[in-house]
Image: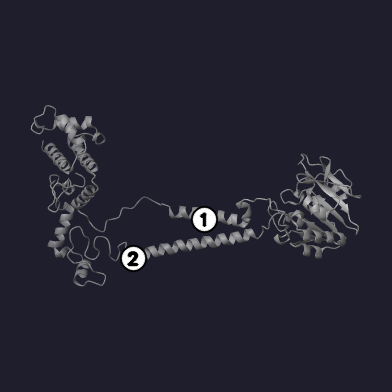
Amino acid sequence: MPGRSPQNPDHTKAGPSDPPGGFGGVGCVSGRSPQGAERTSAQHSDPSSRSASEETSRRAPGPAETAPTNPGPGTGSPTTGPGTGGPSGPSGPSGKANRTRRARRVLATLAVLATGVTILAALNSGTRHGYLDPRSADPLGSRAVAELLKDRGVTTRVVTTAAEAAEATGPRTTLLVTDPDRLGTTQRRTIRSAIDLSGGRTVLLAPGSHSLADLSPGVRAQGDATTNTPVPGPDCTLPAATSAGRAATGGGLRYTTTLPGATACYPSGGHPTLLTLPAGTGGDTVLLGSETILLNESLAEEGNASLALQLLGSRPDLVWYMPSLADSDPDAGAGEDKSLFELVPDGWSWALLQLFLAAVLAALWRARRLGPLVTEKLPVVIRASEATEGRARLYRKAGARDRAATVLRAATRERLAALTGVPHTRAHDPATLAPAVSARLTDGTRDGTRDGTRDVTALLFGLTPSDDAALVALADHLDALEREVRTS
């Protein structure tokens, strides 16, 4: 039977505390196991065998010693009880201190990781200012052209309002408007006044029909220009264009005008993508259909850098106007839909990625296993009979007669296989075990039947008992069968 001591195989009756016919007496071994009995008897009969610490604790119990001095069956030492409530038990002060230390270590690690991620995100976000920003080193920023202009003595100033842009313009300045179509009506009029009065150069990046009527009357947009491969040549007499040669001005807008003195360059489909208009005060206005030549990722291609430096570096001061939300026309971007990831700043996306990697590393660190499992001694020695009775009561409470019968038969088959010489791997094979067991039985054990093998097969591999009484009878028959094989 499972859990039965091998030194005492014949004890199969229920203990005095188990009800008759119940699961508590099925395959249970009454009394103590040899090891538990020897230890318990030694404790009661030989006081001199106790350790010095036990004697001290028995004579002078301390504040933490609350258990009785005469432990009951299955309990541990007098000071600790059955593994709980003692000074070193899992619920004692030592266990709470260990849990507190582990929690503090985890919190400290998370705090360090969060601090590092925050610092890295702050450092990374400091160089990310957006699209066409002269402070941004991103592929879509314009820091490279600003640095090249600085090397040539051109000072770049970033402004975000139309009033600041108009105030900063003059004969020695170049005003760059990065997104003219976003300007409101008041802002467009302010920039138009600055163009007429400054006497400097004004560069409008990809102005559309929404802003051309106010910023550059007499010019119309002719739709999108194709991205030609190879990129087109200047095909004009503008010195900046002829000096730069081929440049990536396609992929944006094309323009047409009837104004006298206009210079059309880099045609796409018969319409220029770069248009220069003279101003009456000595300045000029440049309409550039695409911002590609100003981006960091494409500045080194073809003649993009040369064209950008000549268009923006003709005056010693450059005013880089990036319209803010306050200067934006509410109707200009009403039809633009942005995804969630486009609305999240670049610095936060890197921070989230770093947090995810930190969480993965922390999980791997906490789940590490540096060696095999270590077997520790139990604080309390539990007798085999108590373990068997506890499992039997669980089976009885759940009504698991099928599981109980399976356990009884499996344990009996393994012991019979060892007694009859059947290999352990064939212990659960009816065709191998049943004939071997039947050969060891006498005619009296076969109950007068002609086919003893069939009776053994039904007993060891039969159906599930229908009630508790049948289960108890099955346990008795299995025990009798094993006893007969042992004595044959």
- Work out how far the residue at label 2 is from the one at label 1, CA to CA, in angstroms: 31 Å
The single residue placed furthest to the top in the displayed view is 450
Could you tell me which residue is drawn at 56 percent across and 59 percent down? 117
Amino acid type of the residue that numbered disc 2 sits on in the rendered structure: Ser
Q: In which quarter of the image is the C terminus?
A: top left
Disc 1 secondary structure class: helix
135 in relation to 240, above or below: below
Q: x, y percentage for residue 251?
A: 75, 44
Q: How many labels does the image show?
A: 2
Could you tell me which residue is drawn at 16 percent across and 42 percent down? 475
Answer with left or right where residue 407 lies relative to residue 261: left
Answer with left or right where residue 422 lies relative to residue 449: right
Instruction: Report which residue position mark 1 lands on.
Output: 358
Q: x, y percentage for residue 95?
A: 34, 63
Q: x, y percentage for residue 438?
A: 15, 31
Instruction: Report which residue position mark 2 lands on.
Output: 94
How crowded pointer 1 is (Cα within 10 Å; few <14, some 14-19, many 20+) is rated as: some
Q: Which of marks 2 and 1 is nearer the N terminus?
A: 2
Q: Which of 421 and 284 is in front in this view?
A: 284
